[in-house]
């Protein structure tokens, strides 16, 4: 017998390893709306299979917890069984020897803490409280509820204009979202159970590019009702579009000289071209929307007040976005050479780009805006751009493809460093950015690790310009003066968009949610349009006359996902032309054929698979 | 377009755009199926209709997938057979298979499929789920028989727009129950019974009331008790279906003879009650038309208890627009224990009164206290469905086909053609208009004047306008509660205006009622309705006001329509009882505000 042996994986172990990765994929594709008790019981059962069997609490306790949860799920539990479950979980947590046991128990304690209602619902009524509203995962996760399997089927059938019309039933920003949507729809795509999610956004982009100009539908007969929209960004214009289609007369007030909001003044042109944005805006305006540019909301000269709008219109939708920058609060921050990301991007949108030729730039922040602004700085001629972020790169809120894009263009990311001071010379010019080192620490209640003070010396990064990209807020004074509640820098509304305190006033988009995504803003605009229509005493239906192709029966062998490609980093960093290129026809055909058509296969067939109207 | 497909090696030309199921049916290769219900439930849940399609790695459900040109299908390959058998076995592992005591014994899609496929051995651990259910509710759900085909969910959603049923629980425990976490007694269930007649198994059925009548309880065979039975119009259009009688042999006369042989002392006809309803409702309508008031909504008929429950739960603000007339069943029941009891000199509490109805909601109607006006407990002691009556007749081992045709008993068994069409959509309106016109104009119209009031395929409801001696009368007729909701929404939005509207909760009216014989996958309301219209056409008397026994009843007992006595016995206040409200009321209230 050999003294030592190298380890080799048995066939069974290999298969189990594969199973683990399958399990991960399956969890990714977990449909929304599952019963949390059922899922946690299933999870607990897996934990029990992991126990080594040495210790009592883990070997027996987890099994008994599974039994109690099964009883509860079978309608045989009582309120006392929930107490016993909690007691047991606490003791397993406190007495298990290793993480296999105490973390499993900890999970159940967390469950009891956060959804005890669901446990009690099973005991009292033998029901799940959780209800599945929209059974198609991608549609459920789209804030605007776009009929995704429908338009993918239309792309597959080569009916691109119909695909665009179908998208617009829920979202008028088809061209824009095809390029910059954060695609929450892809997160739980059932295709993850086979290989990887469908490239939904890419297919939308392809449909829009192929379709060319698709005219807007004709509005319904005029109602004579007048609605004012404050803010010409994605949320305001979505509401304007749908309200106009419902037959109402709509006026959009926009503070700036052009429509588009953050799409024009926040997202740089190399991510979203002017043509792509204008395509959507032209379509929206073609329905007959009145636009008043250069008028902000407030009491100042050239402004329009909430009071006036309420007097002159039957309803008002406030969608002013979040355009006010936040300050870091460090020494040397005030003065020339320090600029907010919002201002830098807005100045470009207004045709006054900053000249950063040969400058060294430090960008503070870790979100998408920080990436956008650092990549913009490169294009404005900066010789060096460093992003300073107090956590790890992995903790950044920016999409990973944005971070990769920025790094490919030569941007340096200095992680685990927090801003300490802007160092200036005698003339007051910025000379360096002082950052202090951090160590990644304990996880906070939000699930992110906190940066803690670290040993080591501060770093002074030589630079001429500091760009602050640590978030935005709204200018709320005027709103508050008019009785509109504002909390933590955001307007407070119910989920209907209605401002309870002020009849006839609705709000949505970034000014309610804080800086968020285009599609969330669009979703909020759609919700507001429906509820304003009802508020005005109507129940107009928005629908589209597009029949959805039957799904093909072909089976679905595993197949790689088509990702969009980017222009070469060395050349794209020199101009503001779009960095991303769309799919080829061949790619779109293959990608659209990967769709599993959850509108047809699965539970969604019970209620027709789609909301054909709203 | 015609395409070419190959099924089991034979080549067929078939229309494109049809399902594999339809294609196989058309070409003589019908497929077994449990959950499929054409246009209502095409969800591929039971996986019993699977077929093999060349080029496909896995089996394909035939019910919800379409044929394509050149498709090569195998409906009976070993792979398919095995899949069907296994899936049936899986269903059986959770199914209470005590078929002998099931109300659907002999008429069960699961039983049939297992029989056809010769399922014998049991492969799996048997785990039959149980549920708690109030056994006094007219509609019973037995979890142990439910195969989760979800037809009930779909019927209630799509045909009746009520959404009483929904999926509850999750994962492997997923099942059907009352939606919104409610108990059935607290739900806005109209007890129409459409979920029952579309259930493939015995999971949904009506409360069985037969044992309260026959034979081991007191009523029948008890010399001190006079048993009286009344039979609703629609029952005669369907009763033969459950007794293997042809439609020609299943005459009303033979039905009366069969019931007499079941031991009932008096066999009456609810058609008489229908004639009486016409007298009261037509008079009530004319009074309303000439009362000088402007009515926002039309007068609605009130003979369908499912519809009354619908209106009270969905549009409680419109209850005052319901006719106050009781249903034919109710009128007949009250007259049985007053007028008739007097006539035969028997105290009302010695009469045991039974009705046979095509309906489940009638079981809830007789339990409404404010409808009991005869002063001797319930005016009607028991209501049986057509299905229960058929079972009762079967238990007598009668040679029904060769029974003589006998008349119903007098006086509450004499009726007209107007009474018999009460059992089909449009019939109540037509009958009421015949007499209404006579009462308004003083002359008898041709009986076929008002037959135009009928729903077309294209529109949820039918409408017609008439001139009643200078009074314009706008009428509408609707059946099925989803259609009804559309009509009411149109009325509330002011898009349509009517004076008189007939509503029946079940599609096609009582002939398609929730208490009628069940034929899986077949809708027989239209055929049965035509039968009632034929009976009307053949009737000697076709106007309710010409019914001699009705005339005698008014002469000897009631006085005239809407008299004080008629109001006391034949009308009701619909506000006297509570109905659970719809959980979605707000939506419609909002529509109303405009």
Image (spheres, coloured by chain):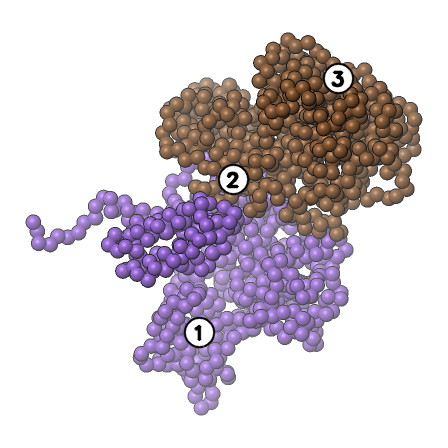
Which residue in the protein does label 2 denote? B132
SS state under label 1:
strand
Which residue in the protein does label 1 denote? A363
Question: Which picture quadrant has residue A258?
Answer: bottom right
Q: Colour of chain A?
A: purple
Q: Nearer the viewer, mark 1 or mark 3?
A: 3
Mark 1 and mark 3: Cα distance apart in space: 98 Å
Question: Which picture quadrant has residue A111?
Answer: bottom left
- Residue B384 at x, y percent in the picture: 64, 26
Return the residue nearer the eye: A592 or B433.
B433
The quarter of the image holding the N terminus of chain B is: top right
- Residue B494 at x, y percent in the picture: 78, 45
Mark 2 falls within which chain?
B
Question: Which picture quadrant has residue A284?
Answer: bottom right
Res. B409 mark: 3
Q: Which chain is brown?
A: B
SS state under label 3:
loop
- Residue A147 at x, y percent in the picture: 55, 47
SS state under label 2:
loop
Residue at position x 39%, y 79% in the image? A435
Would you say residue B552 is visible in this rendering?
yes
Return the residue nearer the eye: B10 or A134.
A134
**Same-subunit check for callouts 1 and 3:** no
Return the residue nearer the eye: B143 or B75.
B143
For mark 2, does the 10 Å Cα neighbourhood hold few (<14), some (14 to 19), or many (20 or more) residues? few
Mark 3 falls within which chain?
B
Residue at position x 21%, y 48% in the image? A9
Mark 2 and mark 3: Cα distance apart in space: 43 Å
For mark 1, does the 10 Å Cα neighbourhood hold few (<14), some (14 to 19), or many (20 or more) residues? many
């Amino acid at each position: 017998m050999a003294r030592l042996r190298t380890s080799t994986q048995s066939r069974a172990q290999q298969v189990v390893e594969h199973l683990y990765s399958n399990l991960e994929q399956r969890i990714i594709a977990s449909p929304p709306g599952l019963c949390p008790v059922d899922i946690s019981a299933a999870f607990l059962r897996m934990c029990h299979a992991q126990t080594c069997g040495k210790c009592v609490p883990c070997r027996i306790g987890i099994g008994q917890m599974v039994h109690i949860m099964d009883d509860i799920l079978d309608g045989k539990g009582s309120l006392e069984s929930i107490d016993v479950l909690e007691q047991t979980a606490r003791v397993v947590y406190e007495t298990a020897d290793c993480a296999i046991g105490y973390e499993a128990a900890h999970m159940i304690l967390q469950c009891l803490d956060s959804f005890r209602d669901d446990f009690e619902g099973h005991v009292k009524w033998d029901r799940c409280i959780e209800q599945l509203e929209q059974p198609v995962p991608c549609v459920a996760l789209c804030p605007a509820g776009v009929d995704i399997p429908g338009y993918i089927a239309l792309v597959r059938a080569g009916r691109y204009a119909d695909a665009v019309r179908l998208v617009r039933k829920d979202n008028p920003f088809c061209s824009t979202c095809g390029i910059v949507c954060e695609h929450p729809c892809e997160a739980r795509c059932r295709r993850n159970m086979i290989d990887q999610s469908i490239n939904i956004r890419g297919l939308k982009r392809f449909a829009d590019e192929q379709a060319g100009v698709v005219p807007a539908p004709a509005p319904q007969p005029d109602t004579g009702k007048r609605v004012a929209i404050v803010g010409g960004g994605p949320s305001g214009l979505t509401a304007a579009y749908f309200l106009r289609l419902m037959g109402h007369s709509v006026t959009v007030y926009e503070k700036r000289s052009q429509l588009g909001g953050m799409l024009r003044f926040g997202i740089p042109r190399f991510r979203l071209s002017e043509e792509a944005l204008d395509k959507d805006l032209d379509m929206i305006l073609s329905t007959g929307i009145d636009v008043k540019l250069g008028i902000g909301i407030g009491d100042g000269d050239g402004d329009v007040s909430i009071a006036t709008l309420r007097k002159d219109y039957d309803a008002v939708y406030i969608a002013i976005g979040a355009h006010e920058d936040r300050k870091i609060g460090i020494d040397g921050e005030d003065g020339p050479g320090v600029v907010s990301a919002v201002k830098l991007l807005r100045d470009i949108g207004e045709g006054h780009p900053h000249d950063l030729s040969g400058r060294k730039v430090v960008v503070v922040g870790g979100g998408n805006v920080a990436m956008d602004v650092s990549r913009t700085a490169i294009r404005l001629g900066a010789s060096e751009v460093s992003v300073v972020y107090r956590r790890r790169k992995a903790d950044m809120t920016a999409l990973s493809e944005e971070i990769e894009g920025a790094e490919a263009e030569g941007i340096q990311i200095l992680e685990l460093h927090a801003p300490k001071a802007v160092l200036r010379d005698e003339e007051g010019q910025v000379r360096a950015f002082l950052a202090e080192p951090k160590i990644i620490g304990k996880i906070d209640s939000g699930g992110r690790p906190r940066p803690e003070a670290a040993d080591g010396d501060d770093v002074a990064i030589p630079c001429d310009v500091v760009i602050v990209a640590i978030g935005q807020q709204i200018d709320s004074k005027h709103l508050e003066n008019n009785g509109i509640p504002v909390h933590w820098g955001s307007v407070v509304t119910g989920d209907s968009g209605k401002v309870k305190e002020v009849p006839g006033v609705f709000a949505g988009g970034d000014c309610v949610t804080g800086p968020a995504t285009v599609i969330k803003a669009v979703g909020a605009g759609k919700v507001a349009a429906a509820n304003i229509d009802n508020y005005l005493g109507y129940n107009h239906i928005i629908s589209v006359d597009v029949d959805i192709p039957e799904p093909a029966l072909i089976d679905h062998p595993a197949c790689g996902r088509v990702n969009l490609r980017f222009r070469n980093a060395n050349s794209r960093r020199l101009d503001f032309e779009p960095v991303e290129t769309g799919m080829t026809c061949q790619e779109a055909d293959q990608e659209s054929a990967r769709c599993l058509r959850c509108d047809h296969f699965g539970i969604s067939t019970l209620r027709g698979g789609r909301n054909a109207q709203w | 377009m015609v395409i070419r497909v190959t099924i089991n090696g034979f080549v067929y030309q078939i229309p494109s755009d049809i399902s594999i199921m339809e294609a196989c049916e058309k070409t003589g290769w019908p497929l077994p199926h449990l959950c499929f219900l054409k246009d209502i439930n095409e969800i591929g849940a039971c996986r019993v209709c699977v077929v093999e399609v060349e080029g496909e790695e896995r089996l394909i459900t035939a019910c919800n997938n379409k044929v394509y040109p050149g498709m090569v299908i195998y409906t009976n390959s070993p792979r398919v057979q095995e899949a069907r058998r296994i899936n049936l076995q899986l269903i059986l592992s959770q199914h209470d298979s005590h078929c002998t005591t099931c109300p659907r014994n002999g008429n069960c899609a699961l039983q049939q499929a297992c029989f056809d496929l010769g399922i014998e051995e049991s492969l799996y651990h048997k785990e039959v789920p149980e549920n708690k259910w109030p056994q006094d509710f007219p509609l019973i759900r037995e979890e142990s028989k439910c195969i989760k085909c979800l037809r009930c969910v779909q019927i209630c959603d799509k045909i009746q727009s009520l959404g009483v049923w929904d999926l509850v629980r999750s994962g492997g425990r997923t099942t059907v129950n009352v939606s919104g976490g409610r108990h059935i007694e607290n739900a806005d269930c109209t007890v129409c019974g459409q979920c029952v007649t579309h259930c493939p198994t015995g999971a949904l059925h009506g409360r069985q009331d037969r044992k309260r009548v026959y034979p081991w309880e007191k009523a029948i065979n008890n010399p001190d008790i006079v048993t009286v039975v009344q039979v609703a119009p629609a029952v005669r259009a369907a009763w033969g279906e459950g007794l293997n009688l042809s439609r020609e042999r299943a005459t009303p006369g033979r039905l009366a003879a069969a019931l007499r042989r079941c031991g009932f002392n008096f066999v009456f006809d609810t058609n008489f009650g229908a004639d009486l309803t016409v007298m009261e409702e037509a008079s009530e309508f004319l009074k309303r038309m000439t009362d000088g008031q402007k009515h926002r909504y039309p007068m609605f008929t009130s003979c369908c208890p499912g519809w009354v429950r619908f209106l009270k739960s969905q549009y409680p603000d419109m209850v005052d627009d319901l006719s106050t007339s009781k249903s034919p069943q109710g009128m007949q029941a009250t007259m049985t224990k007053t007028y008739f009891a007097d006539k035969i000199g028997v105290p009302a509490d010695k009469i045991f009164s039974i009705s046979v109805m095509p309906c489940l909601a009638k079981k809830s109607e007789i339990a409404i206290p404010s409808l009991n006006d005869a002063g001797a407990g319930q005016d009607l002691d028991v209501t049986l469905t057509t299905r229960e009556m058929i079972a009762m007749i079967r238990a007598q081992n009668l040679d029904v086909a060769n029974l003589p045709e006998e008349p119903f008993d007098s006086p509450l068994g004499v009726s007209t053609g107007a009474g018999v069409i009460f059992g089909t959509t449009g019939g109540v309106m037509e009958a009421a208009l015949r007499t209404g016109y006579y009462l308004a104009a003083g002359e008898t119209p041709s009986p076929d004047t008002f037959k135009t009031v009928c729903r077309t395929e294209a529109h949820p409801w039918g409408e017609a306008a008439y001139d009643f001696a200078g009074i314009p009368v706008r009428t509408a007729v609707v059946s099925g509660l989803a259609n009804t909701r559309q009509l009411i929404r149109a009325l509330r939005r002011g898009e349509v205006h009517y004076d008189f509207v007939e509503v029946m909760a079940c599609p096609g009216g009582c002939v398609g009622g929730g208490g009628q014989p069940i034929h899986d996958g077949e809708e027989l309301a239209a055929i049965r309705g035509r039968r009632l219209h034929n009976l009307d056409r053949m009737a000697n008397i076709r106007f309710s006001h010409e019914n001699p026994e009705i005339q005698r009843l008014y002469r000897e007992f009631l006085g005239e329509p809407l008299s004080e006595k008629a109001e006391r016995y034949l009308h009701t206040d619909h506000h006297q009882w509570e109905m659970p409200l719809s959980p979605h009321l707000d939506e419609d209230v909002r529509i109303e505000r405009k």
